[in-house]
């Protein structure tokens, strides 16, 4: 595979350079060349489909998608904490999960990783960190399986976006969505009660396990982590976590059998996760019991 595509190596156009702040232009300079052996020989039709999914619902022109595919690089990572020192190394990029499973979270002072969001192929790992000053990952990243990351160089993204308004809109929407996610996380910690946080955690976990779920059966969560670990992920104690899980079971929303949790009423779980107005979480539990 070539060290970098022609789009990545090309200089910024004068018109695009005028639109970017000096700090952003400096960020776009590669920190080092991508070495042979870091990527895969070629990217195929499945990668085009992955890019369409990643930028949906905005529809990029076919030539734009092809330029992004041609200029993208695939990096492999083993199980464990992400080995890349930052989103700007080896090149400032947006990072998309191509294969495998990844968890976003944080690392405690004792070096313990706590997950708050699982990712599946087609999810963005990072869209803001390479533009930060200094560049850094927004979250700690743990590879739960061997993974492949699709790296889209910022230089390439900006060049293609200059010719395709749909990509401009998609990138803006993704950045705004990232801000909203961070705001939602803060709101969860500050204001959401434990049942709501647990319900949101379960819904995220179901999304992460989507490929393994049997569409003809009730969704099942296998709690691989200890209760203390899951409790830490939603910012509570193991005792409070157990009480919240018991409330979901008493409301006939889930059925708990050891570390196996079967989802009986997804709509009710959504209502608990995203209550409307003060006191509505209790109403959601009440509706779940009536439905049962």
Image (tube, rainbow, N blue to C red):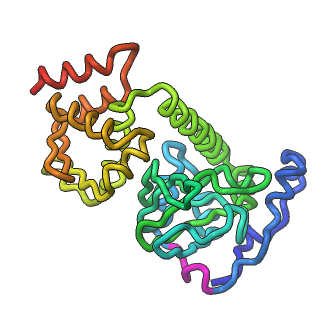
How far from the left and from the top, in percent, is residue 25?
A: 85, 55
**What type of secondary structure mainly makes up the magenta span?**
loop
Is residue 46 visible in this depiction of the protein?
Answer: no
Q: 267 or 85, which is in the foreground? A: 85
With respect to residue 191, does 257 lie above or below? below
Give me the residue at 87% from left, 52% from top: 17
With respect to residue 240, does 80 lie above or below? below
Q: Quadrant of the N terminus?
A: bottom right
In-image side of 103 versus 129 (left or right): left
Give me the residue at 31% from left, 31% from top: 270
How far from the left and from the top, in percent, is residue 13?
A: 85, 57
Is residue 168 visible in this depiction of the protein?
Answer: yes
Residue that protrudes farthest toward the top in the picture: 278
Give me the residue at 25% from left, 31% from top: 267
How far from the left and from the top, in percent, is residue 10?
A: 81, 68
Count the numbered circles shown. Answer: 0
What span is colored magenta in the figure?
A: 37-43
Q: 271 or 3, which is in the foreground? A: 271
Quadrant in which residue 68 is drawn: bottom right
In-image side of 180 versus 46 (left or right): right
> Can residue 39 be found in the magenta stretch?
yes
Give me the residue at 36% from left, 31% from top: 196
> Can residue 74 be found in the magenta stretch?
no
Q: 233 or 3, which is in the foreground? A: 233
How far from the left and from the top, in percent, is residue 138?
A: 63, 51
Residue that protrudes farthest toward the left in the picture: 292
Q: 61 or 197, which is in the foreground? A: 197
In-image side of 77 versus 17 (left or right): left
């Amino acid at each position: 595979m070539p060290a970098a595509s022609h789009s990545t190596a090309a200089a910024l156009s004068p018109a695009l350079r005028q639109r970017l702040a000096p700090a952003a232009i400096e960020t776009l300079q590669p920190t080092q060349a991508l070495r042979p052996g870091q990527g895969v020989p070629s990217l195929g039709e499945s990668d085009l489909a992955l890019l369409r999914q990643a930028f949906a619902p905005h529809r990029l022109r076919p030539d734009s998608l092809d330029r992004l595919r041609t200029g993208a690089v695939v990096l492999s990572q083993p199980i464990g904490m992400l080995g890349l020192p930052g989103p700007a190394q080896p090149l400032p990029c947006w990072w998309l999960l191509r294969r495998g499973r990844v968890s976003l979270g944080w690392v405690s002072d004792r070096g313990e990783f706590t997950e708050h969001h699982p990712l599946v192929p087609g999810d963005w790992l990072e869209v803001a960190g390479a533009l930060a000053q200094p560049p850094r990952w927004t979250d700690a990243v743990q590879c739960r399986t061997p993974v492949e990351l699709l790296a889209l160089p910022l230089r390439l993204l900006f060049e293609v976006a200059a010719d395709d308004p749909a990509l401009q809109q998609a990138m803006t929407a993704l950045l705004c969505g990232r801000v909203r996610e961070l705001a939602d996380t803060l709101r969860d910690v500050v204001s959401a009660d434990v049942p709501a946080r647990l319900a949101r955690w379960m819904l995220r976990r179901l999304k992460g396990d989507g490929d393994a779920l049997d569409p003809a059966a009730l969704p099942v969560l296998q709690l691989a982590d200890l209760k203390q670990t899951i409790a830490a992920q939603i910012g509570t104690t193991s005792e409070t976590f157990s009480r919240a899980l018991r409330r979901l079971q008493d409301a006939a929303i889930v059925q708990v059998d050891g570390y196996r949790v079967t989802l009986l009423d997804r709509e009710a779980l959504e209502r608990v996760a995203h209550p409307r107005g003060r006191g509505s979480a209790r109403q959601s539990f009440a509706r779940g019991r009536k439905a049962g």
